[in-house]
Amino acid sequence: MFDSDEVVESAILVHIDFSSDHEREDLEELKLLTESAGVPSRTVLTGSLSSPHAKFFIGTGKVDELASLVQMHNVDVVIFNHSLKPSQERNLEREIHCRVLDRTGLILDIFAQRARTHEGKLQVELAQLRHLSTRLVGGRTELGRQKGGIGLRGPGEMQLETDRRLLRERIRHIQKRLAKVASQREQSRRSRKRNELPTVSLVGYTNAGKSTLFNQLTGADVYAADQLFATLDPTLRKLELPDAGAVILADTVGFVRHLPHELIAAFKATLQETRDADLLLHVVDCADEQMRENMEEVDSVLAQIGADEVPVLMVFNKIDKLEKSSTRVEFDDEGQPRAVWLSAQQAWGTSELLDVLNQLLAGVLVNYQLILPASASKLRSRLYAMKGVVRESFGEKGEFVLDIRLQQADWQRLLKQEDEPLERFISE
């Protein structure tokens, strides 16, 4: 790993407004990202352009202004709120004599800090190496000495001056290890499918409150903080619902505007949990001024990973930050729940959300009264294990009288697995 001496760095932020909506970024989000990376910003350089400058991304006048600011504030890094070409990074560094980091590099650095599991660290390393592979040139090595600072954490023993052959070998090695992890995840998913356990995946823009909601619903103790990308590694917990029974709730990484393609590719195995879910809870910070734009960005990423066909329940979180709002459930024209308004932090509306989840996931339920002879105690135990027994009494001859309630899929599976036909035990 890189040597990390916990150097406290400082940065100058660069934000350019473009006429094209596709190029436009949010300055406040850049500040939040920088704070999440643990780097104080000294000042912000802003400007307007119709299109990026080919050599420096910004105009030559802005380059001179930036060089003066670097010298004045004696900062360690300049962070652009945009994606830069490798040549633009190198040209800027030669002119301003300071390390330059773009938006993609900043997000990758935050991910490197947040990764905790073996899989998460591998995914971040893969993403960073892919990003670095486009920036490996001889002229950059003097700026590539590792200090453990922002944009330089994560990729194991790799140095920026590592030749491309070693880099490709390392990438192939990580891909093989991740393929093994993906295979293990696929086996777990198949096991859950065999057990007919529905999966609910929390998705949403970063810092929307997914982990806080996850903790409220499951009683878990997942790390939750008011910062971007507080959660990186996915967490799965079992949740018991009255009618739907056991379901799997998955807390996933938050999305962000213009999420780097390197991350989407590297986190394919993790995002598979979202694509294969039975229901998505799209958690939205309803107090955020960029709420609509954030929702559109999440929809865009869902489409990229092939999860845009999964049913979605909107969850508008943080209503405690609104002046006038209350917990409520919204329904569509067919009477189906489509949105829940709540505050996960205050635990307002979580019971209503559980009721809605129970309604959506219960599916078609079967209700029967079974009269089982004493010799069928094994079947009786199995029904209890499936949490399908609502009530039990005893007949005049000592037989078990069970009122059962099961999902149709569970009942059909039981019919196939039992040696004798269960229909004969159903009370008329």
Image: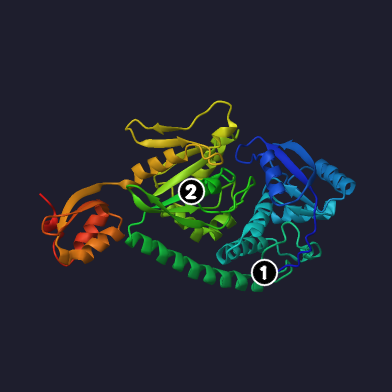
Q: Residues within 10 Å of mark 2 (few under 14, many from 20)?
A: many
- Residue holding disc 1: 156
Residue in the foreground of this view, choosing between 390 and 193: 390
Residue in the foreground of this view, choosing between 328 and 404: 404
Q: Position of residue 48 (x, y in %)?
A: 73, 36
Q: Position of residue 29 (x, y in %)?
A: 66, 42
**Residue at image coords 21%, 48%:** 367
Residue in the foreground of this view, choosing between 396 and 116: 396
> Does residue 417 appear anywhere in the picture?
no
**Residue at image coords 78%, 42%:** 59
Q: Assign a secondary structure to mark 2.
A: strand
Q: Residues within 10 Å of mark 1 (few under 14, many from 20)?
A: few
Residue in the foreground of this view, choosing between 101 and 52: 101
In three-dimensional space, the C-alpha distance between marks 1 and 2, rounded to whole angstroms, equals: 30 Å
What amino acid does circle 1 point to? Gly
> Does residue 145 appear anywhere in the picture?
yes
- Residue holding disc 2: 202
**Residue at image coords 73%, 41%:** 15
**Residue at image coords 62%, 37%:** 20
Q: Assign a secondary structure to mark 1.
A: loop
**Where is 373 relative to 258, above or below?**
below
Furthest toward the right, the residue is 72
Residue 399 shown left or right of residue 91 in the figure: left
Q: Position of residue 22 (x, y in %)?
A: 60, 40
Q: Give the label, 1 or 2, closer to the camera.
A: 2
Disc on the earlier residue, 1 or 2: 1
Q: Position of residue 255 (x, y in %)?
A: 56, 48
For the rendered model, the colour scheme is rainbow
What amino acid does circle 2 point to? Leu
